[in-house]
Image (cartoon, rainbow, N blue to C red):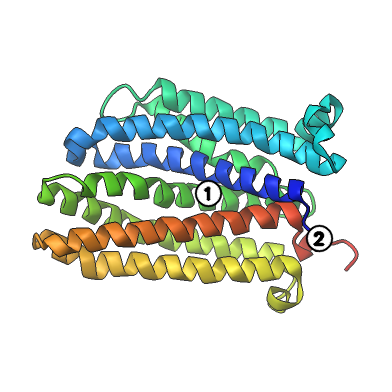
């Protein structure tokens, strides 16, 4: 598999679009269920979400331009209106429109400590906009039970947004001086995450079963090897989350000052691993295709 400079640009732009969109949407979720514990952090978190929404919109546009350049093979594709129109008509236009509407709803309705219903609606729309295009979306046209991949990817995206969107806000909360609030916010996220992780993993397993022909694809197929890389990274992320929940959270409630520093380091590590996961996901959706959609087999 040869990867050109414009292919790499598409992967980077797509990964940034994933990260900023899902983090913005998840930040709204975090504000909604933790608003009573945030105190002075609520304002900075709202500003963070608005900034992420702007980055998501800009990165989405850059992704379309980079895709056009990748298709043409040179920088001339950046100004090729015909290629851009083709990309938008192929499904990216609908996904981008849904995402943009969701981001606008988020930015326009973050006026109070607890997000309004329209902000939550925008968060759901933005996070699930990726379900309108891509390999999973393609499965709906070839499977008898077309609803199954659609439901699985929507659940998966919302779960990822919930997790990813809480990480930076938790870092901001950990910088506060009220250690009881820090412990309460981390504990509330950890308790909710237990259920979310279960649903997230179940949806991920369903998607893998749909996208792969059999387990040997994980080491014999290019797409499968990327999936295996992603599974390894997710395992690292779950290990960090388990350490936070079972070891650090009790120490936070005991007002252990060292636990706050350890929590900060652990969340930074989670962010780094999550970034690698999103890059791997972007590579999966850009550079190769799942074996289940390879009609030559």
Q: Secondary structure at mark 1?
A: helix
Instruction: State left or right for residue 250 relative to residue 71.
Output: left
Relative height, residue 285 to residue 80 (above, below): below
Residue 131 drawn at (x, y percent)? 63, 44
Which residue is at 28% across, 41% downward? 33
Which residue is at 21% across, 47% downward? 175
Residue bearing mark 2: 2
Label 2 crowd (10 A; few <14 / some 14-19 / many >=20): few
Relative height, residue 13 to residue 65 (above, below): below
- Most extreme residue toward the right, as rendered? 296
Tell me which label, 1 or 2, sits earlier in the chain. 2
The label on residue 157 is: 1
Q: Quadrant of the N terminus?
A: bottom right
Residue 219 drawn at (x, y percent)? 70, 77
Instruction: State left or right for residue 63 relative to residue 235.
Output: right
Residue 78 drawn at (x, y percent)? 77, 32
Nearest the camera: 265 or 162?
265
Nearest the camera: 177 or 215?
177
Instruction: State left or right for residue 178 relative to residue 188.
Output: left
Image quarter for residue 244?
bottom left
Label 1 to label 2: alpha-carbon separation: 29 Å
Whether residue 193 is visible to the viewer of this picture, yes or no, is yes
Relative height, residue 44 to residue 34 (above, below): above
């Amino acid at each position: 598999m040869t990867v050109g400079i414009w292919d790499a640009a598409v992967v980077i732009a797509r990964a940034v679009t994933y990260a900023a969109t899902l983090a913005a949407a998840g930040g709204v979720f975090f504000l909604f269920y933790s608003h009573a514990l945030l105190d002075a952090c609520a304002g900075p978190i709202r500003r963070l979400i608005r900034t992420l929404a702007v980055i998501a919109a800009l990165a989405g546009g850059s992704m379309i331009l980079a895709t056009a350049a990748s298709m043409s093979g040179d920088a001339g594709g950046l100004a090729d209106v015909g290629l851009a129109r083709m990309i938008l008509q192929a499904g990216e236009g609908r996904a981008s429109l849904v995402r943009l509407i969701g981001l606008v709803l988020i930015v326009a309705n973050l006026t109070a400590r607890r997000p309004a219903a329209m902000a939550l609606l925008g968060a759901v729309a933005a996070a699930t906009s990726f379900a309108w295009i891509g390999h999973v979306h393609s499965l709906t046209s070839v499977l008898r039970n077309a609803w199954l991949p659609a439901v699985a990817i929507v659940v998966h995206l919302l779960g990822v947004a919930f997790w990813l969107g809480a990480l930076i806000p938790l870092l901001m909360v950990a910088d506060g001086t009220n250690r009881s609030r820090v412990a309460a916010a981390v504990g509330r996220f950890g308790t909710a995450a237990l259920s979310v992780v279960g649903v997230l993993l179940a949806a991920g397993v369903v998607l893998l079963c749909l996208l792969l022909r059999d387990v040997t694809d994980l080491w014999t197929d290019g797409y499968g090897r990327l999936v295996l890389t992603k599974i390894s990274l997710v395992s690292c992320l779950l290990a960090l989350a388990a350490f936070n929940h079972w070891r650090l959270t009790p120490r936070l409630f005991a007002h252990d000052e060292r636990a706050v520093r350890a929590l900060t380091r652990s969340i930074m590590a989670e962010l780094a691993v999550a970034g690698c996961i999103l890059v791997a996901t972007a590579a999966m959706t850009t550079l190769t295709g799942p074996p289940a959609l390879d009609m030559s087999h």
